[in-house]
Amino acid sequence: MRLREIFRLSHREFIILKTRSIATVITIGVLFGALLAGMVILQGMENVELKYAGEKTNYVINLSFGDEPSNLDHIASFNNVTDASIFYDSVTRQRNYISEKTTRQVATYKTYEQYKSQLRPLVLILIIVAILILSFTFGHVISQDANTTALYYSLGASRLQVFAIYFCYILEICFWAMVFAIVLAIIGSGIVTCIGWDNFVRLFSKTHQNSTAFPPILIGVNWECATILIAIYASAPLAFLLCLDQLSRKRLALKLKKS
């Protein structure tokens, strides 16, 4: 059995069980899409506020540091807020004193990092939920599809090939769930941008006075977004392993005997 044939048969399972497959896609997509939307909006807010914060110095970050609060005579300049934040933390760990002159870019960056860190544990929780949902769906599929699975074996398909068919089925569910989550996140961030446009402009302008009123488009992408999408696929092999024994010939024979 060729790889293309395996994909064709797995897609056939998706089409035959379309209602349950789509319901699973929507459920997982909504869960991960809500988390992804939150991360996209936070990153978008960070990007916009860093523009407000860094405009005065053309986004150059000047950090003064020393041994006493009244004697900060050393200055380090950075063009990257991530590098500036790392340096800030290293000086703080040495129990020295440090402050950011003119702008609040490092403070803004750290604030949003704290917000994003509160969302990260939710990824693990959603993986567990997705595994349970996929396991339930997969178990139901195998129960309804025992005759077809037995037919695959009778036509000469190896155990590994049968495993591949159903694993690709789970991967297809995860793929469409990922697409649904991305669409949901973009729509959600777009709605928040439109509804809160004036409020965000007033908030950022008040926090960072005498700055240009940059458009608060709250759509941003970071590595956490990629992690959330990868987490959808990470749940697939784990869910498959939980239900692997249901594809054994012995278990299928019992199901066929009961039916």
Image: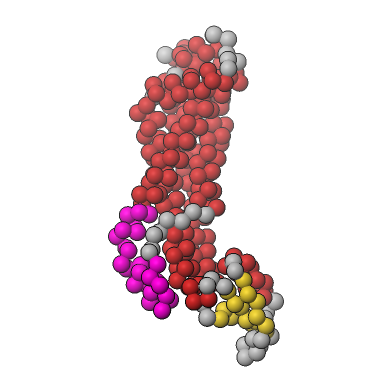
On the image, which quarter does residue 144 sit in?
A: top left
Task: Pick the residue in front: 4 or 16.
Answer: 4
Residue 129: x, y in percent? Answer: 47, 43
The residue sitting at 53% across, 28% down in the picture is 167
> Which residue appears at 54% of the width and 31% of the height?
240
* Residue at figure coordinates x 64%, y 86% from the top left: 72
Q: Give the vertical position of 1 relative to 211 (above or below).
A: above
Considering the image in quadrants, where does the C terminus appear? top left
In this view, the residue in front, 188 or 115, is: 188
> Which residue is most to the bottom?
70
Q: Magenta stretch containing residue 176, yes or no?
A: no
Q: Can you give x and y, in whole percent of width and height, for residue 209 in the image?
A: 41, 79
Q: Which residue is depicted at the point 47% across and 59% down?
A: 43
Circle count: 0
Q: Left or right: where does residue 30 sit relative to residue 125?
A: left
The reply to whether residue 226 is in sight is: yes
Magenta stretch, residue numbers: 189-214
Q: Where is residue 23 drawn, in percent x and y?
A: 37, 34
- Main SS, magenta region, reads helix
Figure quadrant of the N terminus? top right
Regarding residue 31, the answer to whether it shows in the image is no
Q: Nearer the viewer, residue 140 or 161?
A: 161
Q: Is residue 205 magenta?
A: yes
